[in-house]
Amino acid sequence: MRIIAIVNQKGGVGKTTTTINLAAALTLLEKRVLIIDADPQGNASTGLGISNASRDTTIYDVLLDEASIEEASLKTSVPGLTLVPSHIDLSSAELEIGKSDGRTTRLKSALELLDVHYDYVLIDCPPSLNLLTVNALAASNSVIVPLQCEFFALEGLSQLLKTVEMAKANINPNLVIEGVMLTMYDARNRLSDQVAEDVRTHLGRAVFNTMIPRNVRIAEAPSFGKPVMMYDPNCVGAKAYMALGNEIIARHKKRTTSN
């Protein structure tokens, strides 16, 4: 089971969109996937068509040791994709567990008790480097960083990478950067090309080959409670996320073979 945190402290870079659509792509590649919605906004839950009324048990209950991952899990309309939903109550979790023992490893402990096998667990993190994000980093094998192809793309990235290194040094020595993923790429815009070139120059092979384009179908899909490949499987956005899924699986196979 590979646990991946989708992290960036900036909002609007495509974390939730990536979580939903990468998960759906992996299921189409015959992987069993669990999404953990660790953002109090609950957008991953909404984007998969899970209404607030049906979120009786959420990741909030898991972090407070009031429920297991299995008890909080919901089947989605995507075959092979399960979700642990979020709720606005999660915004108070940091205060409630902030002074307790093991506050940074609550999610890790819950996942270690998981009886159901998944090939991938994707954690959609909030747009801040808070205790919820630290829990995700402590629980994960690796991190994917969505980075939009805009002028301030690299601003804040160094702080995020320092946080990942700090988590690795203090709570999770096995944590690695899975990759930096360029989102909202516009081939008609010279700035997009310049940003992509700058990021690849700075980070080299840490950057995924796949870039996620600006695509209206990606933006529309969440309002229908669907991943883009279920909403419009032939659009360029769906094809890009399928390519990303294939690239991640290929990286894991290569890493497993080399070990």
Image (cartoon, rainbow, N blue to C red):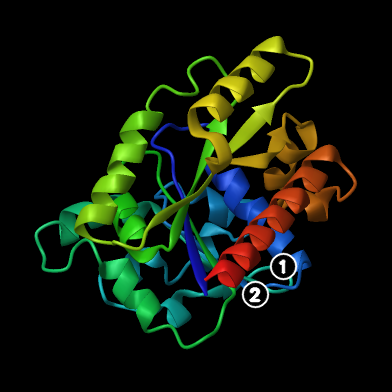
* Mark 1, other Cα within 10 Å: few <14 / some 14–19 / many ≥20: many
The answer to whether 30 is drawn above or below residue 185 in the figure is below
Rendered location of residue 11, percent (x, y): 46, 32
On residue 59, which mark appears? none
Q: Reply above or below: 17 against 11.
A: below
Mark before the other along the chain sequence, 1 or 2: 1
Q: Is residue 39 above or below residue 189?
A: below
Q: Using the image as rendered, state which of residue 231 and residue 4 is in the foreground.
A: 4
Look at mark 2 in the image and give the residue it sits on: 32
Q: Nearer the viewer, residue 153 or 14?
A: 153
> Which residue lies most toward the bottom here?
115
- What residue sits 77% from the left and 43% below the top? 240
Which residue is at 57% across, 19% downward?
150
Where residue 174 appears, as percent x and y from the top left, is 35, 63
Are the residues tagged 1 and 2 within 8 Å (C-beta)?
yes
Query: Residue under circle 1?
Result: 27
Labels in figure, total: 2
Q: Quadrant of residue 136?
A: bottom left
Tell me if I can see residue 92 in this picture: no
Q: Quadrant of residue 182?
A: top right
Estimate the x, y position of residue 17 in percent, counting from the top left.
61, 44
Q: For mark 1, give the secondary structure.
A: helix
Q: Amino acid at mark 2?
A: Arg
Looking at the rendered structure, the kind of residue marked 1 is Thr
Could one spot residue 117 in this view of the protein? yes
Based on the displayed image, in which of its 4 quarters is residue 108 positioned? Answer: bottom left
User: Crowding near pointer 2: few (<14 within 10 Å), some, many (20+)?
Assistant: many
Q: Residue at x 60, y 61 (%)?
A: 50
Q: Residue 144, relative to residue 74: is it above or below?
A: above
Along the line of sight, which residue is nearer the eye, 49 or 143?
143
Q: Is residue 229 left or right of residue 251?
A: right
Name the residue at 86% across, 51% down: 233
